[in-house]
Amino acid sequence: MTNQILKNFNNLQFEHDLLHWYAESKRDLPWRSENDPYKIWVSEIMLQQTKVDTVIPYFNHFIEKYPSVYELAAAEQQDVLKAWEGLGYYSRARNLQNAVREVVEEYGGKVPSTPKELGSLKGIGPYTKGAILSIAFNQPEPAVDGNVMRVFSRVLKIEEDIAQQSTKKLFEDYVRELISKEDPSSFNQAIMDLGATICTPKSPGCMLCPVQNYCRAFAEGIQEELPIKKKAKKQKNLSYVVLLIENENGDFVIEKRSENGLLANLWQFPMVPIEEIGMDHLENWIYSEYGVHINLSKQVGNLKHVFSHLIWRLEIFEAKTTQTEIQDDRIIFVHRDDISKYPFPVSHQKMLKYIDSTIKDDTV
């Protein structure tokens, strides 16, 4: 099938025009200043499901804090999660640190340069593996993500559903055939830049495209119909009441999430599955669950937080307690001045403004 798709396709001229455009137009990104496989690795993990403009300041701060695999391997996980705070998908940070520790212990601190060894590291899938091998080590390995599939679905007029794993494998085969053998690093980065800046999901800038002459979708006027992607399943809605529980010392109750699953090892304000419990039983539920007596106060806000597979609908309430000690290992009292030292998911970071407002209220 690959040969049929690429039949009569002028791949050498395509490569020439693409790389010429990239040499003149490539984005100035901090991880492109050197071919350090560690820094490229960090950037690629951060870029998964996150926009480039968002990643740049996080990348610069992270590399300043952990300039090599050795610093990251030796760091406390809570500090790493704090440095990652706001990027989301925190399993990426945990997997990155675990893999970096393996690099230090098993490979003497050198990021492995073979597909088998690199691909065996935690959190490195086919795309990340291909990106590191091609960009850092200049090996002709495909790095296929959504950008790349969008570009080649149009250029080669591929009408397979890109949501299917089998389709991604097909694109890897196409890229392996087309990738520059002399400069695979620039080739893969050029496709990434092309997808990010010109061959965009909506209203692609075809008149500015350096490979317009080779694009079969453009020739047929169907570029905006590709790629084909069937809609994902509808997201599940979950409703919670989130409690900002404060004692007389200005300490708030925060809870550490489980070390497994969604937002593992991050901190949050206690969340009550309100559809199961009901508001009438909320205070009793908190005591039976955590051993904390509370008096529920006013609602101060609400939030909607969207994950890829579910939606949190959060109602935020203030609550008071006379307790100063807690027996449950999952939760602790933290003074309001120290809360920001703990890594919180984005949804709970947004709630810190309500704690700030209580400080203002107290000083009025």
Image: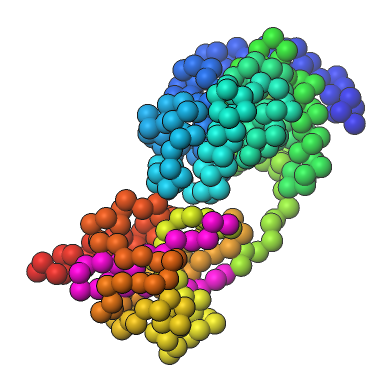
Q: Nearer the viewer, residue 246 or 18?
A: 246
Image quadrant assignment for residue 135 = top right
**Where does the image place residue 184, in percent across and percent down from the top left?**
67, 17
Residue pushed farthest left? 364
Is 290 placed left or right of 104 in the picture?
left
Is 189 placed left or right of 273 in the picture?
right
Q: Residue at x 39, y 72 (%)?
A: 327
Locate the N terminus by quadrant: top right
The chief SS type of the magenta part is strand
Locate the C terminus by quadrant: bottom left
Image quadrant assignment for residue 242 = bottom left
**Where does the image place residue 244, in percent across and percent down from the top left?**
33, 70
Whether residue 207 is visible to the viewer of this picture, yes or no, is no
Q: Nearer the viewer, residue 189 or 59?
A: 59
Per the image, is 258 magenta?
Answer: yes
| Magenta residues (range) | 237-260
Q: Nearer the viewer, residue 257 or 169?
A: 257
